[in-house]
Amino acid sequence: MFSVLISEKGGQQSRLDFDKSEITIGRMKGNDIVLPKGNVSKQHTRIVLRDNAFFIVDLKSTNGTYVNGRKVTAEQAVGEADKIYIGDFILQVEQPNAAANPGPPMPPQAPGRGLPPQPPQAPGGNRPMDRHFPTVMDGPQAGGFGGQPQSGPQQPYQAPQQPAAPQQPAAPQPPASGPQSAPPRAPSIPGAPMTPPTPTPPPGGAMGGAMGQDLRQTYADMDAHPIDADVLEVAPEVEPLTEDERVTGEGQAYDPGFEEVDPFDVAATPTPAPQAAPQAPASPEPAAPAYEAPAYEVPVFDAPVDDEPAPPAPLDEGVVETPGPQGIRPLATRIALEDEFDADAHLAQVDVARVVFEKIGEDELPLSYPPEDGDRARFENIIDEAIEVVSPSGDREALIDTLLTEAVGLGPVESYLDDPDVQAIYVNRFDRIILRRGGKLVIAPRVFSHPEFLTVAARRLLGPQDGVSPADEVRFSDGTRVHIVMPPLAVDGPVLTIRKPRRYQPSLDELAAQGTMSAGMADFLRRAVEAGRSIVIAGPTSSGKTTLLGALSRLVPESSRLIAIEEHSSLNLDAPTALRLEANPAQGFDMRYLLRGAVAMHPQRIVLDECRGAEAYDWVTAAASGTEGSMLTLHGSSAVDALGRLESLSLLGAADLSPRGLREQVARSVNLVVVLHATSEGGFRVQQISEVQGVDLDTFRLGDVFYYRVEGGTGEFYPTGYIPMFYEDLRHAGVDVDLGIFRE
């Protein structure tokens, strides 16, 4: 009989016991240890116990087996101190007599010294690893990877048992028969104090039972065996870890009462326990607030500190994304807007406008647009007389033209509409206009000189109506869209949001040349489109989702009938088999109506731009039942966020489906998720590309393929090393694919 200790980055450690001399490890059922992750081969590794010695053999796995950072190329002997790296997992073997037996009773604690609190578990008692654990096909199930947890917090070493002085008389305590006899833990509440609810301590001390004895023994051993920082050895760098993972571990809170060494970053050596703060006497007190873990540095690492917060680290290949370092959104950096506002010219405009409205009433301003010649001549005379009264400094003709455009036209908005460098215009109020130029936001140089000029300009855009609608949208013949919000909804006066159509639609290679993605990522996405993979493109507003969607849609082979459905037509699809549909909700033809009609047009692929409602379910149904290679865009800051939003929107169209069934259908319909983020320079970049592997309990199982990371103040695109499943299928089918894009 021997034991195997299994741990995963950020997860609990578990022990599996076997009564055989040889076991196999792999991803598929039939192995003695099943590690269901995409970077683990079907049959990955074999461990053999022969003549009281362990030997490991790699079974020609795709990603290889590593012992202490060195790849296994032939049968190799391993010891109990060696670490075996298989995908995301770290394994260690133990001889039959190496299992720790319960030692003698611990001496009573010194007065004023309390036990460090147990790391908080997830709400409801679920540990992070409980959501995606391997299973054991043979042998008794004893660890968290197939049975009940054997130990509490993950410990970086197994300390020898030390003799201890007899305990003071206490209530009888049943003897512990070993780690497996420890009673199951009750779910703990994060942030709650670890003191018992009553002054009377339970049998065995402040933390009774086998668990309390194990913890007391552990910390006594840690005091007896202080660590020397010189003996620390950096572990082999198998997978890139984020700073948060190196410090606290995924999903675990750092406790300031003692220093711990992350077992995934340094060699397994005992760690000293600094003096803990004295514990308050047991008395009924209000529950302490949840402790927010402070940041600390492991002395072994000398990593550069970025001036800016780094973007979210990549998901581990095949790991379900959980709240933790991977779930953190990149923090927005406060950047001052470029200010082009001409204050002197605006003061002159205001003075002239004041005199103009002394001569005419607000209801005398014409509402027709374009203006009539008679109106232009009349108001030109009025403005000229007002300038004579004010006598402002500056260019007289330019001032007349500016005021005349406000009186009979759209004011400063007209010049910005004619400027090809301006992509969007945001009129927040009469004296505050923001422009998007070259991807950056700038404060406009010219604004309206009077609130009434803005109100009249908004009414001219809306056109003749029986009553002014508080919110409406107008579209010009060139594709420019104007969204208008009128008072009382707009508190500071009419609000205009104007988006001009894209004149330049880059290709995938051009996006890669601009730094939006790496060349390897572009090659991967091209292969995905050609192979008919369904893709979800997610990101916040103005993050380039439609731009990337257009670049990918133009890669669809002409032999495929493609139907693009948009709320506002902007995709430029030149293929003879491509068809574009545009929604018109005002007349009852919304996106869902068009999507249902598109299914009857025999499409091979359906492209849906800006999914916001119940049409999500129709797209999911179509993508899962024949229209392979479909694509859509929606809002989301991460892969899990995007899939969760797609699932929530699908519920609007299929409320009678069970959440589990709908989640599985979403997982079948989506193959890849591409996450985009806007950059401070005004562009956008691909932040993450993930493959959807399926559903794991109540969440989606993802495998990160590429990610963007900032190191030393500069950002780079990195592959994770994970090879998507469809690339394996292409290679087996004889397609010449470049697997080098998945290696750094």
Image: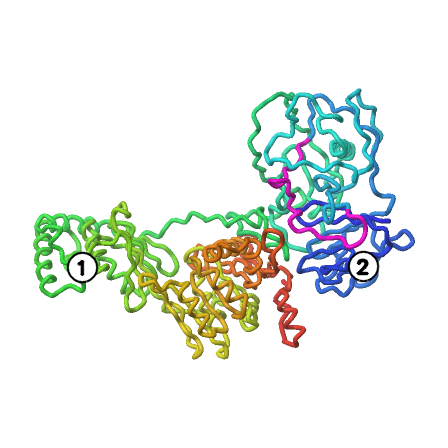
Question: Where is 592 relative to 81, above or below?
Answer: below
Q: Nearer the viewer, residue 291 or 102?
A: 102
Q: Is residue 645 left or right of residue 203?
A: left
Query: Magenta stretch: residue 138 in it?
Result: yes
Q: Position of residue 519 (x, y in %)?
A: 55, 67
Dominant secondary structure (helix, strand or loop) of the stretch shown in magenta: loop
Question: Is 98 part of what is drawn in magenta?
Answer: no
Residue 302 seen by the camera: no
Q: How many marks?
A: 2
Q: Which residue is mark 1?
A: 405
Between 309 and 696, the residue placed more toward the observer is 696
Residue visible at 54% across and 70% down in the picture: 626
Residue 628 placement: quadrant:
bottom right
Viewport quadrant of the C terminus: bottom right
Instruction: Tell me the tag on residue 46.
Output: 2
Report the magenta residues as a range: 116-141
Q: Secondary structure at mark 1?
A: helix
Residue 485 location in percent, x, y? Answer: 28, 52
